[in-house]
Image: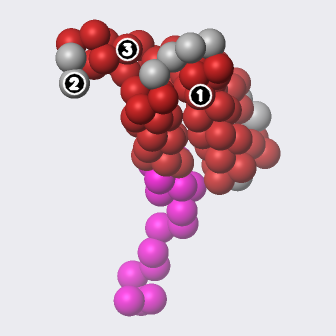
């Protein structure tokens, strides 16, 4: 893997998460979307993966685009886990 491929992967990752992050930011102001992070982050993850693979149709490298898509999907999965932990009810002391 050359330095050019690493730069391509980083650039494709960053480009693929720009639009979905805008969606996540807007959805954080909508109470119904805030209560259902699974839907929001799933849609954003699929959108990020689709954006990463659009460059393949334009002549991009398949392996580098696949790595960028995996990184984008993992980024939104991590965001979902954090959002789900925020809205989870706190355990009661006697329930353990």
Answer left or right for 31 relative to 96: right
Spatial CA span between label 3 and label 1: 13 Å
Q: Nearer the viewer, mark 2 or mark 1?
A: 2
Q: State which quarter of the image contains the C terminus.
A: bottom left
| Residue at the (47%, 67%) spot, across then down | 90
Q: Quadrant of residue 64?
A: top left
Spatial CA span between label 2 and label 1: 19 Å
Task: Check the image and report above or below for 65 versus 90.
Answer: above
Q: Which residues are the magenta region?
A: 81-96
| Residue at the (71%, 49%) spot, across then down | 39
Q: Residues within 10 Å of mark 1 (few under 14, many from 20)?
A: many
SS for tag 1?
helix
On the question of residue 28 being in view, the answer is no
On the question of residue 90 being in view, the answer is yes
Answer with mark 2 or mark 1, whichever residue precedes in sequence: 2
Magenta region includes residue 95: yes
Q: Which mark is residue 53?
A: 1
Q: Position of residue 41 (x, y in %)?
A: 62, 43
Q: Which mark is residue 8?
A: 3
Q: Nearer the viewer, mark 2 or mark 3?
A: 2
Q: Residues within 10 Å of mark 2 (few under 14, many from 20)?
A: few
Q: Which mark is residue 1?
A: 2
| Residue at the (57%, 22%) spot, across then down | 56
């Amino acid at each position: 893997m050359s330095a050019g491929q690493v730069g391509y992967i980083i650039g494709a990752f960053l480009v693929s998460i720009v639009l979905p992050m805008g969606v996540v930011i807007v959805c954080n102001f909508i109470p119904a979307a805030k209560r259902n992070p699974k839907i929001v982050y799933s849609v954003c993850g699929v959108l990020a993966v689709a954006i990463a693979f659009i460059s393949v149709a334009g002549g991009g490298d398949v392996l580098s685009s696949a790595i960028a898509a995996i990184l984008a999907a993992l980024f939104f999965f991590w965001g979902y886990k954090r959002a789900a932990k925020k809205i989870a009810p706190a355990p009661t002391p006697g329930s353990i």
